Image (cartoon, helix red, strand yellow):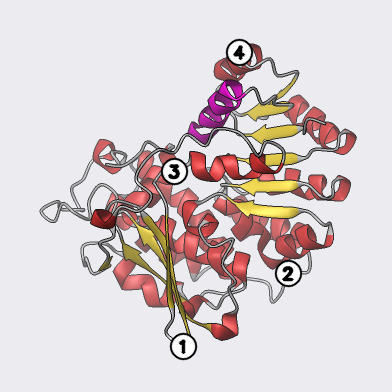
Amino acid sequence: MKPKILIIGSTGKLGVKLLNYSKINKINIFCITGYKNTNLLNLQKKKYNVRNYFKLSEKKEIYKFKLFLTKYKIDIIYFLDYGYKSLIYLNIFLKNNSNSLIAIANKEMIIAGGENLINKINKSKNTLIPLDSEHFSLINTKINNKELKKIYITASGGPFYFKKNVDLKKVKLNQVLAHPKWKMGLNNSIDSSNFINKILEIYELSILFNINLNKIDFLINQNAYIHSIVVSKHNIISINCFDNDMLITLIAPLLKYYPNIDLKHKKTFLDYKILKLEKFKDKRFKINKYLTILKKLTPQQQISFMILNNIAQKKYISGEIKYNSILDFIMTNLKNIKTPIKFTSINDRLKFIDSINSNYENYY
């Protein structure tokens, strides 16, 4: 029996890649969703012969999609969008589905949902597959916080790290968005340029594998071939590498139902030339100033940091703050947010996020 596959965020970079691959391999997609790019969503519906599709920028479509999630048993659900709001859809999904694969490339959802989300996925007998390459590289590694000395994820360096003569106080938006390795959406490109994405990924890793924040750090691997390094308390080191191709992670959930599909990876099994690592030590980046503090934030503060980052991005794009002031804005406002002592449910977390957004509704 063919699986029912749902792609949330089909009009983004990853969604387009997954749909193209599915068509080549004759994999039927049951449902797709998009947001603002409704023209592309309509084209995808026709090109890939998708019967169910929803434009989640419209209230009526959101309502219909929520009903859809209660009506059908979905075997694989992909979250390839951006932002915490899809946590609402996942919360509905978990009430009506079990033994499904939940593939998430949306780190904001995981940070927003935290341990409440992980517990709910486990209790509902669903399986989470993180699609960020760093976290995906660890899914077959037995990680125990007590047995762990250190765990590293890697960063490629973005558009500025290896250009030491660039003054970050003077960079323009087109420079910020010009990632040397890959094309990403606006938000992810900004996060990658100033290393905020690594902080968010550290939070995500801590949640996914129940690891103390003080045991997690990041290193620079310019070629993005090494994705994670695990150091046990006995100093046994495991290095997880694979080609920098998101198809590797996107295909993984499909293998349960299509074990013989063409993986399309024909590069050298191990490329020794691109294993070079270096410690992050560039003082131009504001992340240096706040790194110690950021690795001590509570789950509530981590959510606040994530939301304030989105607000800061909006302010930067509109010209209200400068690029090199993004982190200063976040950290200044982080002090002013009163956080609850504990979250008891996903709904608690969503209400907390709404309370933050209500104070910054003009920007988010």
Q: Are circles 1 and 2 on residues that touch, CB within 8 Å?
A: no
Q: Amino acid at mark 2?
A: Phe
Residue under numbered circle 4: 47
Q: Which residue is mark 3?
A: 187
Q: Please tell me how crowded label 4 is: few (under 14), some (14-19), or many (20+) other residues with Cα within 10 Å.
A: few
Say the numbered circle drawn on residue 314. none
Where is residue 86? Give x, y as percent: 67, 44
The residues colored magenta run: 12-25
Q: Identify the mark nearer the N-term, 4 or 2.
A: 4
Q: Counting residues from the N terminus, which is met first, the one under dot 3 or under dot 2? A: 3
First-in-chain label (4 vs 1): 4
| 354 in relation to 338, above or below | above
Mark 1 Cα-neighbour bin, 10 Å: few <14, some 14–19, many ≥20 = few
Task: Indicate which disc, 4 or 3, sits on the residue closer to the N terminus.
Answer: 4
User: In front: mark 4 or mark 2?
Assistant: 4
Q: Amino acid at mark 4?
A: Lys
Asked if 61 appears above or below 354 in the picture, the reply is above
Q: Secondary structure at mark 1?
A: loop
**Quadrant location of the C terminus?**
top right
The residue positioned 60% from the left and 20% from the top of the image is 41
Q: Earlier in the sequence, mark 1 or mark 3?
A: 3
The answer to whether 132 is drawn above or below residue 139 in the figure is above
Whole-angstrom CA distance, mark 4 to mark 3, is 28 Å
Q: Position of residue 94 (x, y in %)?
A: 81, 50
**Residue at image mark 1:** 234
Q: Nearer the viewer, residue 89 or 316?
A: 89
Instruction: Point out the residue furthest to the bottom here.
Output: 234
How far, Cα to Cα, is label 3 from label 2?
27 Å
- Mark 2 highlights which residue? 343
In which image quadrant can residue 76 be found?
A: top right
Corner quadrant of residue 119: bottom right
Q: Amino acid at mark 1?
A: His
